[in-house]
Image (spheres, coloured by chain):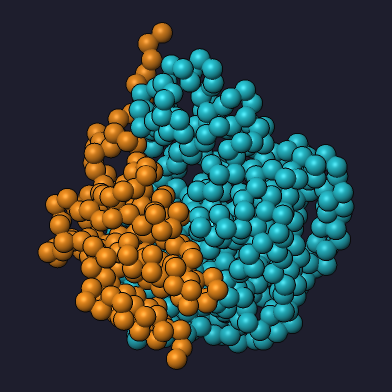
């Protein structure tokens, strides 16, 4: 049994009721899970010695614009000992006020990646230790990578520095 | 991009700085300790990185990096242009090694769209990739030495880098804004003259780089200044998702060229330098050794490269040559379709990462089958490596902060995207 099948069978064995979809496109294995189980699955993937996904190398999200479940968060994991990349996905059902549990308790590195995702997509990560914006100023009102945000920006949304009077 | 500089108005940031002891009020802290801003305009932060430091005397108690001063919205722009249009923008990510980014981007799109590349084009890509790595590392070690006060080393590395820029000028016609790679190959063939120029450079470079190493490696001021500062233990490096020379300087033998070989790296004979000291000096030695290994790879490529086409013949996805567009009907139609509507990769998402001078550069594409990506996420190594900075500087002297930033070698063009 190669490692890909092992990952699939291990995940199915434990989380069968919560796995939404497993895809294999161009050699990239991707597992979609119900959002409420994301932390549990992450912990399992990291701590199961046969899988050993010790590194979370990226967290991002996809804005599907017109779909009913608008946001999908995407996690890229890497197992150093097994040399294998895995992608986790979780589709958030609430489009108005998207929230998902943070995986920072499992992977420390997710801290900044989740801050970036919050900044760009406005997805709230519950239990995140320090959920501030990372690129845009704290006073900025929009989330720029959402599809409704125009490419040219919104005039006046970023105030220019005030000139100091002498 | 304007961000508020006045930290007294930035309540969340101050809370973050003071979070280590909750009983402390801001007034107390300001009386006994100092909160200072380092950057964004600071010569040693390699761009516009801003650090807010809380100091007790000269010791750093807490460090909070602030990013975003060079944020240009490259991921947003990618969603609104076709795959070809985006190649020039990849030059501007890590601008010290722009050819590596060009190569990484086209490899990622080729994986998504399923484009085959001719052998000669792959060899040319490997040569420029390694030359880019040498150039990037030369800037890294040169500015690193400059940060700790060794000005001569900086001059010498930039002199060598100038020769590499001349090679790019000869091969591509541009020194910095290269945009040389195309899907399915490269923009123009490497002439014999260029290959000879690369060979001559490598001959010369071996001696001059030895000289550079003799200047620094036995220099007590340089070595003792860096020895044992900016410690990043192995477990922390893995937990923080660190990649590249910093991870290898912390004793983890992980190089994507070896772990998940792309192009012809599986055919090449090269070593992966690993140091277990976990400090700033170890990171310097990793970079120096990698420069030598890159030179070895280029030598092997130059031996193995054979004449042949440098662009794939795949009219639905690869732009045809200009002279064929002007003389043949079919090619004209394909060119028109590609320029106006772009390549249409199948619906799906792929992640592809390469080993860049700074670490793992990854491109995550989500395609909905149209000519432009639905989403592009750039996993930039500088951004991810900067996350380890607070851990490295806390407990160190303020004068070491400069050296530690130099050893991480962030490029803000990439970190801020």
Residue occupying the point 75% across, 36% down = B149
Q: Which chain is the one coloured orange? A: A
Please state which of residues B89 and B69 is positioned toward the viewer in this rendering: B69
Query: What is the quadrant of the N terminus of chain A in the image?
Result: bottom left
Where is B179 relative to B258, above or below? above
Residue occupying the point 54% across, 60% down = B238
Viewer can see residue B348:
no
- Locate residue A145, reporting x and y percent: 28, 53
Please state which of residues A28 and B87 is positioned toward the viewer in this rendering: A28
Residue B327, by quadrant, is bottom left
Point out the residue furthest to the bottom here.
A1
As drawn, is B358 to the left or to the right of B218?
Answer: left
Residue A153, by quadrant, is top left
Please state which of residues A13 and B42 is positioned toward the viewer in this rendering: A13
Where is B176 relative to B350, above or below? above
Query: What is the quadrant of the C terminus of chain A in the image?
Result: top left
- Locate residue B47, reporting x and y percent: 55, 41
Viewer can see residue B25:
yes
- Locate residue A100, reporting x and y percent: 25, 56
Where is B17 relative to A134, above or below? above
As drawn, is B113 to the left or to the right of B289?
Answer: left
Residue occupying the point 78% across, 48% down = B156
Q: Which chain is the one coloured cyan? A: B
Residue occupying the point 54% across, 48% down = B388
């Amino acid at each position: 049994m190669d490692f890909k099948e092992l990952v699939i069978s291990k995940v199915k064995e434990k989380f069968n009721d919560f796995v939404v979809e497993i895809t294999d496109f161009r050699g990239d294995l991707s597992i979609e899970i119900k959002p409420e189980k994301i932390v549990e699955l992450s912990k399992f993937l990291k701590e199961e010695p046969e899988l050993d996904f010790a590194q979370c190398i990226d967290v991002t999200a996809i804005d599907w614009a017109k779909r009913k479940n608008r946001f999908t968060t995407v996690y890229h994991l890497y197992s150093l000992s097994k040399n294998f990349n895995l992608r986790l996905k979780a589709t958030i059902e609430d489009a108005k006020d998207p929230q998902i549990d943070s995986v920072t308790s499992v992977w420390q590195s997710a801290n900044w990646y989740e801050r970036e995702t919050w900044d760009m997509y406005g997805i709230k990560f519950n239990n995140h230790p320090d959920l501030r914006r990372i690129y845009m100023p704290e006073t900025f009102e929009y989330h720029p990578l959402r599809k409704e945000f125009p490419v040219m920006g919104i005039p006046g949304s970023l105030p220019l520095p005030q000139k100091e009077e002498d | 991009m304007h961000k508020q500089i006045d930290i007294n108005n930035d309540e969340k940031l101050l809370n973050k700085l003071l979070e280590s002891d909750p009983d402390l009020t801001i007034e107390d802290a300001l009386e006994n300790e100092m909160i200072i801003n380092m950057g964004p305009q600071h010569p040693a932060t390699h761009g516009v990185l801003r650090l807010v430091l809380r100091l007790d005397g000269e010791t750093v108690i807490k460090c909070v990096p602030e990013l975003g001063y060079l944020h240009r919205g490259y991921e947003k722009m990618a969603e609104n242009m076709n795959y070809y249009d985006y190649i020039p923008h990849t030059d501007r990510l890590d601008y010290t090694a722009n050819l590596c980014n060009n190569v990484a981007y086209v490899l990622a799109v080729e994986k998504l769209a399923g484009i085959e590349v001719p052998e000669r084009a792959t060899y040319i890509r490997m040569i420029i990739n390694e030359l880019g790595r040498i150039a990037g590392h030369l800037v890294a070690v040169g500015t690193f030495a400059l940060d700790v006060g060794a000005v001569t080393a900086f001059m010498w590395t930039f002199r060598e880098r100038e020769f590499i820029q001349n090679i790019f000028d000869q091969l591509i016609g541009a020194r910095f804004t290269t945009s040389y790679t195309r899907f399915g190959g490269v923009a123009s063939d490497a002439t014999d003259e260029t290959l000879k120029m690369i060979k001559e450079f490598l001959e010369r470079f071996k001696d001059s780089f030895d000289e550079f190493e003799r200047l620094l490696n036995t220099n007590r001021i340089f070595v003792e200044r860096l020895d044992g500062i900016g410690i990043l233990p192995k477990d922390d490096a893995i937990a923080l998702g660190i990649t590249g020379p910093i991870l290898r300087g912390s004793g983890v033998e992980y190089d994507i060229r070896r772990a998940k070989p792309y192009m012809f790296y599986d055919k090449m004979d090269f070593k992966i330098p690993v140091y277990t000291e976990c400090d700033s000096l170890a990171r310097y030695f990793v970079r120096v050794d990698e420069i030598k290994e890159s030179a070895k790879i280029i030598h092997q490529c130059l031996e193995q490269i054979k004449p042949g086409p440098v662009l794939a013949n795949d009219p639905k996805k690869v732009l045809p040559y200009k002279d064929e567009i002007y003389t043949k009907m079919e090619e004209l139609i394909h060119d028109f379709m590609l320029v106006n509507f772009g390549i249409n990769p199948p619906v799906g998402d792929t992640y592809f990462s390469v080993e860049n001078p700074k670490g793992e550069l990854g491109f995550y594409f989500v395609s909905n089958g149209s000519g432009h990506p639905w989403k592009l996420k750039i996993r930039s190594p500088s951004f991810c490596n900067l996350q380890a900075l607070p851990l490295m500087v806390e407990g160190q002297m303020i004068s070491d902060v400069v050296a530690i930033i130099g050893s991480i070698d962030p490029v803000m063009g990439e970190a801020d995207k």
